Amino acid sequence: MRRRHWASFASASVLALALGTGYALAQATLEPQLGIPLLEQPALLILNGDKPPESLTPPVLPEVVVTIETAPKAANAEPEMVTGTVAPSAQPQGGLAPLEVPPTPATTPGVDLDEPVVLDIPAIDLPPSDPALVPAARPAPLRSAEPVIAPPDLPKVVVELPAGPALAAEITERAPEALALPRLAERERSEILAAYQAFENRPFWIDGKGWSAAAKLLVAQLSRAGEDGLRPTDYPLPVFEASDKGSLAEADVRLSALAVLYARDARGARVDPRRLSKLLTPTLYLPSATEVLSEIAAVPDPGKVLAAYNPPHEGYRRLKAKLAELRHHQDDTPMVRIPAGPPLKLGMRDERVHLIRARLGLGPSDEAVFDRSTATAVAEFQKQAGLRANGILSAQTIAALGTPATNRAQQDIVAQMERWRWLPADLGQTHIMVNVPEFQMRVIRDGKVVHHARTIVGKPESATPIFSHRMDHVVVNPSWFVPPSILKKEFLPGLAADPDYAAKRGYVVTRRGNNISVRQPPGERNALGWIKFMFPNDHAVYLHDTPNRRLFATERRAYSHGCVRVDNPFLLADQVLGPEWTTERLKRLIGSGERTIRLPQPLQIHLVYNTHVVQPDGKLVTFDDIYGFHRMVRQALEQRG
């Protein structure tokens, strides 16, 4: 069975080879001269991105010569058998004769049928691969054409490495000394140190040669502090040696501290108004050291950012321009110096009277008597100087007389500029401004006055407070609850003497245990009139109508207990309530009971104390310092100096 199996296997192999050769010859195309079958080239798929330019000609394919050698026949060899392998890239020659399969002998001498049969097939040298069949390499990507015009020569860039790492140790060591400024609070010092630590103790303002370009702009703004009514000596610029690392480090930290001081002073930190009077309660918007350093260190011009901490309001800018004008026309005329001495009152004799009269421009007097004309002139001077106008020559009056008029005017403007710092930077697109010493109220929309009215403010003993808030509702037909101060001064003594004291005057008394409240019901005699404008605050003051409207005809209108009475209040209601609530509709509510109406949106209201106002034409207008607040601010600034 094994011998028969081997014969069948050999016959099948020969038959398969013959059939394959015949099929190849049938499919092949012969070369006309050599008779060599030409190989069929596979179809190539060329992508659009790989297409060569149309002007290129395809390469000429080289001729391929294939030679097939057969092994020599032995004398006793069996019939010839063609063996080999057919490669996918080549086919047998077309000139091979058809193979005849000889009959398989029954036995083969020398062959052990029990052992595996090993065929000795000689290797066939195949022709080299056709270059035409090798895929062409991808063409290089197209490059843009070279510009016809040569690009200009770029300037050389010089990069200077910061001096940070070299000064880190010095900044750590010298920072506490650099921050030892009298007016720099501990909180600001800690924030400045934290800012440097977050910056890996690298300098903000020092480069390899001294002040950086940004630092020079910052230094320039500090040196111009006087233009904004600040004192340049409050910001002494540091002096350093460029070769001394410790000096450089200390100067860098000191400049940061001075910038923080300037920013806070520009927002009103020089004078605490609440220490001057409990009625001066503006909300100061003082920036932190972290805020200041983060803003000025991140811009190319920190001086511009620092200057922006000053008030942006038009009233402040006009005062600043007037201050520059006064300094430009500085009066250098020698002043008459009045020696110090005891206060002088009407009728007293003193040799200084001649100097006083000369200083005030009065004519000479035969006797050194402090007469009525002298006292009147002193009182007028005191009024202009913001002092108490009592006509008595006090030590403060003597000090004011020793100051040139232009210098005194500058001090007044600086004190007024300081009060502008008490206001928020954004007054509100639509806001209400009540100038207490002027006895005027204005509604301002988009920078223009759209409504103004006369006001009545508090008496000197019950002054109207100065602060900013938001008006959020209006009350028509309001009741008036007597405030504690009036209740204590007027009603409690009256009730103690007459239990019907309040009832006779139309008031309702409510007792709850030991507490008592007095209310005036709505009506034409109500102290608040027919309408009040509410902005809840700690002072319990508001704007309202009044039944005693004849007082608006007077010039000095300081009659109230602290609230602000407004002339023609329903016209103000038109401005704050919007078109839905007209004057006619509001007046139809009169007498129908108390009614609360919310504003469409809250409005900022500012109760200010502007005694010095520069008008659009540049003229300086002054108003009486009815509460002495202007004098308090000016003296506080002078004491700091």
Image (cartoon, rainbow, N blue to C red):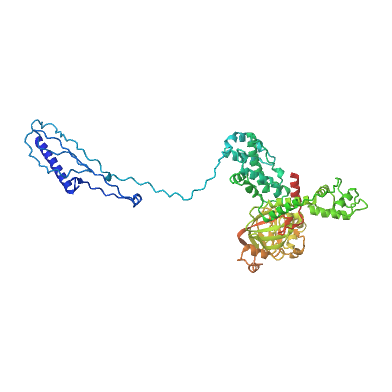
Q: Residue furthest left?
A: 106
Q: Is residue 458 visible?
A: no
Q: Is residue 97 visible?
A: yes
In this rendered view, identify the residue nearer to me: 545 or 353. 353
In this rendered view, identify the residue nearer to me: 369 or 434. 369
Residue 627 figure quarter: bottom right
Q: Residue furthest right?
A: 366
Q: Is residue 280 left or right of residue 202?
A: right
In this rendered view, identify the residue nearer to me: 478 or 513. 478
Q: Give the position of the N terminus as an image quadrant.
A: top left
Number of numbered discs on residues: 0
Q: Percent position (x, y) of residue 551?
A: 76, 63
Q: Percent position (x, y) of residue 116?
A: 14, 32
Query: Which residue: 41% across, 48% down?
Result: 143
Q: Percent position (x, y) of residue 27?
A: 18, 48
Q: Percent position (x, y) of residue 298?
A: 58, 45
Vertical position of residue 43 compared to residue 199: above or below: below
Q: Give the position of the C terminus as an image quadrant.
A: top right
Vertical position of residue 246 compared to residue 346: above or below: above
Query: Which residue: 66% across, 59% down?
Result: 432
